[in-house]
Image (cartoon, rainbow, N blue to C red):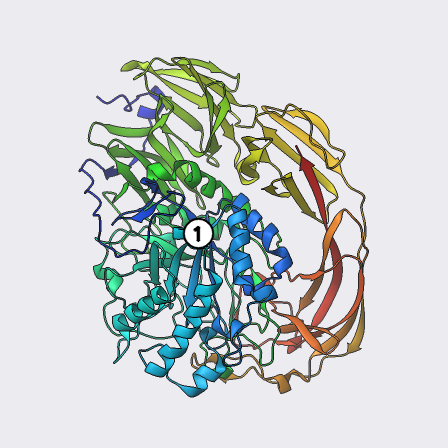
Amino acid sequence: MGWMSLCLAMTCASAETILAVDASSPAPAALENTLKLGTTVSTTGHAIGVNSRYLTRDGKPWLPVMGEYHYSRAPAQQWEAELRKMKAAGVDIVATYIMWNHHECEAGRFDWRGNRDLRRFVELARRAGLDVMVRVGPWVHAEVRFGGIPDWVVNLMPTRRNDPQYLEYVARLYGQIGRQLKGLLWKDGGPVIGVQLENEYNLGGEGEGAAHILKLKELARAAGLDVPLYTVTGWDRALYPSGEVTPVFGGYPDEPWAASRKELPPKETYAFRFDTRVSGDLGAQTRGNQRGTAESDMNTTPFLGAEYGGGLPFMYRRRPIVSPDDIASMLPVQLGSGVNLLGYYMFHGGRNPVANPTMEESAATGGYNDTPAINYDFQAPLGPDGQQRPVLGYLRQQHLFLRDFGERLAPMVVRKPDLVPANHTDLAMPRFSVRSLGDSGFLFVNNHVRQYAMPDQAAVRFSVKLPGQTLTFPSQPVDVKNGAYFIWPINFDMDGVHLTYATAQPLARLDTGKGDVTYVFAATPDIPVEFAISGVSPVRIEKSSAVTTARIEDKPQDVLLRVEGPASDVEINLRVADKRVRVMVLTPEQARSLSVGVIAGQRRLVLSDAQVWFDEKGLQLRSKDDPSFSFAVYPRLAKAPVGAVWTERKDGLFQRFDARVAQVGGQAEAFVLRQAGNVRPVPVGGRANAAMIPYPEQFRPAAAWTLRTSAPKAPQVEQYLLQPDLVGDVARLFDGVAMVDDWYYSGYGWEYPLAAGTSRAFTLQVLPLRADAPIYLDQQAWPDFGGKPQAALLRGVKVAPVYRAQARF
């Protein structure tokens, strides 16, 4: 009888469901030298490699997080702070498209200045501690006009194939990119570790397919772009030269590019993948009619991600809003399916450059989608103006887990449960997976599907058959409720303490000095926290009053620790040999406010509801519309911070500091400029045969307001955000006669930045939304038309200050 068959009277008397997985077979060895890489060793002696299962860094398994941020869609003066915010959010690699038509709008005239200064962006990424993946196209999609290929190229020659004229201009573009990045590549000690070629490429005609991707790689290398990793997107029957490039994958919680006006069936991205890496429709502009290369390359390439949706864009015909859980619940699924590079699209929102013609993808120019002309918010974790969205805290805790424990997870192989859902629309069967190597592993569970209620999985325990033992846990059955998702460790080493399992997720490991270490865990909502400590090594336990102990009846040397009311003052000290291993348990709410960074020369935990990031000066904090700041730090600081009037207090194991800056008020007034007229029916057509954004002439019935704004200059304010609260179809904001931003109404809040110390007048234009508009909005977003055929309302407008504070150490 295994020790985990702990039989408490109450447990044995009750019914339970055992969810089993066999992880006892040996993991196949990872294959080496299956991919032709560029130079992998830098001048600093560091090395990046890849085998058939995972990436390596300096010979060790590496499971990084990658987030997309488009430099040419963002103000250059914000880049440094935004890149540091990404680093603080647990991102390791920043990916960025190089949009050809942002740099060579006119043939032969390249512009790499200002917001288009790729070199400076990469240098700032290095300063922030980020690696860089450049996605060089030449076709990038990115919801940009002609997929990023300049008009003059589209008009003059065939694209996306081995046409000699086209390749001549692609070679010139790559040459320009190579000159911008000279000295910044990995081989030179720089941060650029990879190049993505093309995007969503499944064309298979003459001069296309694998031959075209191979030619692009040759051109990139000839331009000096010698990097460890060359990637291509692997979905929608992508074609590429096997062995020359590594496919990357993605998945989204909805399909804004779909033509449906209804809720979609459950998405594949919420179901564990055991036999394929290719998700469903990801919005490719072309359609392949052959088996993609990625399907046959599964045994020779690692499972890497590039486009797991950090949010969703709004297309004109379809505007779904996603919740933090809709995004975060995808992470255990992807990791539990074997993903070994967690890549997001987008991680940071932006705006298209203001240009004529406008730079967006549109049905009018042959695109499949109608996107806003300027706004590219994407509901991203970081908004276009650096706003921290609620989803960021949900994701950051998973990224911190990967930063400290990804080296353990990366080599582990996926183990398929004994019973799995019939398909991704089967909501009844429990969804879980195990990744393991030897007797160690992680359990991944997801019981959340966007817009669908999942049944509570009642009285559940998990049974994992490993090479040396079978573990059944927790000690008592638990209910996995609708909406739950989590990652639990199995046979997890904590610096000599053998943790057989925990019903909490590891978040971080800190060296806290003098031979002591701290392991930080996050409690799983609605499930009791247990730590099963094995007696393999003698361990002395010191615990707080919130922790109870129980002995295992058939292994009296083992201890089961139960945590009541996890909080930042819950502490378990485990002494093994001459080392103290401290276990800290955070509530789910605390875990979502957790950041980890270096303060006063030591890596520390920081809890704060404000937006925080780290730089050479210490801790930077931002707070929208709230002049109060508070953060807690662990381990404790010897001195209080400076930079604001910080007051100190005790907060459990943490040291908390509070400050308040002077409150200021931005002002906004709205004056009716013109009433709405009767809008015509929404046109239907285009490649999708769906609702199309009305032509400019059809905006004549739009309602309009003059917005007079005041944004007082104050040292404690970084910027202001204009927040129109409106109902309509399409909204456009003008500064004088220039459109500076636009928005598709969806029920999601729109914000536009105002510089401190300015007073401006804008014109806000709102095209009425017809009650019969053939578009998709989430049910809660549809307005009450009150029996009228259309609606165009400005319910209010606000100017919110973004306060800043600094804690220097």
Q: Is residue 220 above or below residue 155?
A: above
Tag 1: amino acid: Ala
Q: Nearer the viewer, residue 210 or 383?
A: 210
- Res. 651 image quadrant: top right
For image coordinates 61% across by 68% down, the residue present is 745
713, 623: nearer the viewer: 713
* Front residue (pair 557, 684): 557
Q: Is residue 694 above or below residue 275?
A: below
Residue at the (63%, 41%) spot, across then down: 609
- Where is residue 24, by image quadrant? top left
Vertical comparison of 92 with 321: above or below: above
Q: Position of residue 252 (x, y in %)?
A: 42, 59
Q: Quadrant of the N terminus?
A: top left
Q: Which residue is mark 1?
A: 453
Residue 659 seen in the figure: yes
Q: The C terminus appears in which quarter of the rendering?
A: top right
Give the image location of residue 181, x and y in percent.
46, 60
Callout 1 secondary element = loop
> Residue 272 location, x and y as percent?
32, 50
Q: Is residue 642 left or right of residue 227?
A: right
Q: Is residue 377 visible?
A: no
Judge left or right: residue 112 versus residue 264: right
